[in-house]
Amino acid sequence: MQGLIWLLEALFKYFTTPTILFNAAWATLLGIIIGALPGLTATMGVALLTGLTFGFPPELAIVMLICMYVGAIYGGSRSAILINIPGTPANAATTLDGYPLARSGQGATALVTATTASAIGSLIGVLSIFTIAPLLGQIALKFGSWEFAWLAIFGITICGALTAPKDPLKGWIAGFLGLLLSQVGMEGISSYPRYSFGRLELMGGFSLIPVLVGVYGIPEILSSIRDYGKREVVVELKGRALPQIPLLIKNWWNIIRSGIISVIIGVIPGVGEDVAAWVSYDLAKRGSKEPEKFGKGSLEGLIAAETGNNACVGGAIIPVLTLAVPGSAPAAVLLAAMWLHGLRPGPLLPVENPKFIYEAAAMMLFATVIMTIFGLSLTKIFLRVLTIDTAILMPIIFILCVLGVYAINVRVFDIIVMLSFGIVGYFMRIMEYPAAPFVLGFILGPMADENIRRALILTNGNITPFFTRPICIVLIIATLLTALFRYRPKVGGA
Amino acid sequence: MRKADFVTGIVLCILCLFFIFTAFKMPVDPAYGIYAHPGITPIFLATVLFILSIYLILRSRIKLSDFKNDIKLVKSFFRKKENQNLLITLLFMLIFVYLIRKVPFYILTFLFIFSFSFFFYRKKPLLLLIVSIISTFVIITLFSRLFLIPMP
């Protein structure tokens, strides 16, 4: 009950404080535009906004970042429906039915249905933060150094397997490479500058935001220009432009199933919205009475994908709050932003600042309301934005990346890091190494390092607790099951 | 893809060996003892990555003789329009980053946006000029005046 009061208090505050309302409104709008533009992802949007809101009060900055996150995941559906290119990877499943619907003259219906499904998905996400986060927080309090060390390994294993389903080996390589590269710089116990070779810039390690913008943003710019001139925009909008309540009632089970499964996927470290959307879509197709319509313009498929990706946002925020482990790539940036603003998400949050969990749920609810209002009212403006030529848009986006990265530490070195990781990220993409486990490795690396060594110090070098503590056993079994069941040997692969 | 996997595996193995050997040279802090050795985690992680990379190499089943005719492939790579676009974009980016703090940022931003868009768009230079000026002005004003972020 106290939690509900905190949530309503926070919500009332956000709606009645003009500064928060104004900033959240433009952050959501920017999020929808960024999500809608092929070449800009939710991760990049949150990362760019982290730089911009660096000087803002922490609460306002986090509200804006959540608005950006929710807006961008939703915004990706605009381009998925209108130009058959998912604005963010989370909307890839949306293209399958959204674009055929737009081409068959039901563009407006598809856009409005996607907006409604996204809003309902976000509400399921809010509900999950409200109910699951405090429970997970209680479990997280039982985590010691041994459990956190295993959590990092488990996170990489499952994230690698789920984000590279065709070849999990590449997912695991990406994850361990991220973990390894995160070891550069001063370590957390005796402050020894590892792999810095006396260079001052390297002593601080690679900052997370430049790495994230590099790995996600630069490959998008490079790919967009490489494929320049290949996209087709549906410029005429036909169909019903109001939410169809009977359609939603007809799809009630589809919506609930997609929401629940996506929240669960969101909680799994690093997996994220794209996998949630695909799994929701797949389950909807299997459970449908008209599976033959899927891929040819099925509103059922569209609803499943859009409910799924937005519900996953709430799920992905849960481990950020309770374990300081991100559930998706944009949530990773959100976590970094929380650290930058002096907030301390993690197992102690429910003890030190229990109100914050409910405030986060209120932030997401607030963002959902704004997103829905903009989504239903500004469809034609988004269509205009999508017609901007890539050759004009991409250099501007690159400049925004440069300044967003530079703003964090005011160092040119970070721009060089961004570009270098961008080139690495592009090669990873063309060679089918997923970026998500790499980024997750970067986040979890310092946590794994400190906890492995702290555990060894505590037990004077005895490694038995790593294998005998109850939560460790659960994590070991989960890791082994993931590795054994997901991996299919691909000898002499294509 | 098999050849790419083979080469990636080799590069990763070299990287892992570098991380492992450097980690062994790291000093032990007497205040914390051997179990706080800064190299423990990098050695563990690099070893796991090394094993995965070796498996990647073995799985690719490539022999060195398979690389004989790859000069032709490299030549055809450069002839493709898509790859030319890619390399030129990368060149634009590298030049931009190199010139940061060597050229005033607002001039550099304007030149970058204009030259980049003109190179690929190849139409309406006057429109591109206006877009470049306006976007440079908006970006610089937004970051330096509104968000109070110093320009590079």
Image (tube, helix red, strand yellow):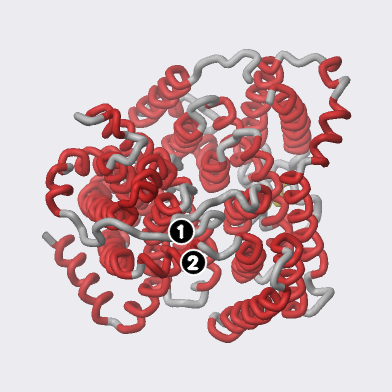
Residue at the spot 30% in from the left edge and 61% down from the top edge: A364
- In the depicted structure, whether residue A379 falls above or below residue A312: below
Q: Where is residue B110, by image quadrant?
A: bottom right
Mark 2 surroundings: few (<14), some (14-19) or many (≥20) residues within 10 A: some
Lateral position of residue A460 relative to residue A105, left or right = right
Q: Position of residue A274 (x, y in %)?
A: 42, 42
Instruction: Give yes or no for contact between labels 2 and 1 (Cβ–Cβ under 8 Å).
Output: yes
Disc marking residue A386: none
Please name the residue that numbered disc 2 is placed on: A385
Q: Chain of mark 1?
A: A
Please name the residue that numbered disc 1 is placed on: A36
Q: Position of residue A448 (x, y in %)?
A: 53, 40
- In the depicted structure, whether residue A429 falls above or below residue A208: above
Residue at the spot 56% in from the left edge and 55% down from the top edge: A39
Q: Are marks 2 and 1 on the same chain?
A: yes
On the rendered image, what quadrant is the N terminus of chain A found in? bottom left
- In the depicted structure, whether residue B136 falls above or below residue A378: below
Lateral position of residue A297 relative to residue A76, left or right = left
Inspect the image, locate mark 2, and give the three-letter code of the amino acid beneath it. Answer: Val
Name the mark nearer the viewer: 2 or 1: 2
Q: Earlier in the sequence, mark 2 or mark 1?
A: 1
Q: Chain of mark 2?
A: A
Residue at the spot 50% in from the left edge and 41% down from the top edge: A451
Q: Position of residue A431 (x, y in %)?
A: 65, 33
In this rendered view, identify the residue nearer to me: B89 or A390: A390
Residue at the spot 64% in from the left edge and 35% down from the top edge: B40
Inspect the image, locate mark 1, and give the three-letter code of the amino acid beneath it. Answer: Ala
Report how far apart the C-alphas of labels 2 and 1 lie in the structure.
Answer: 8 Å
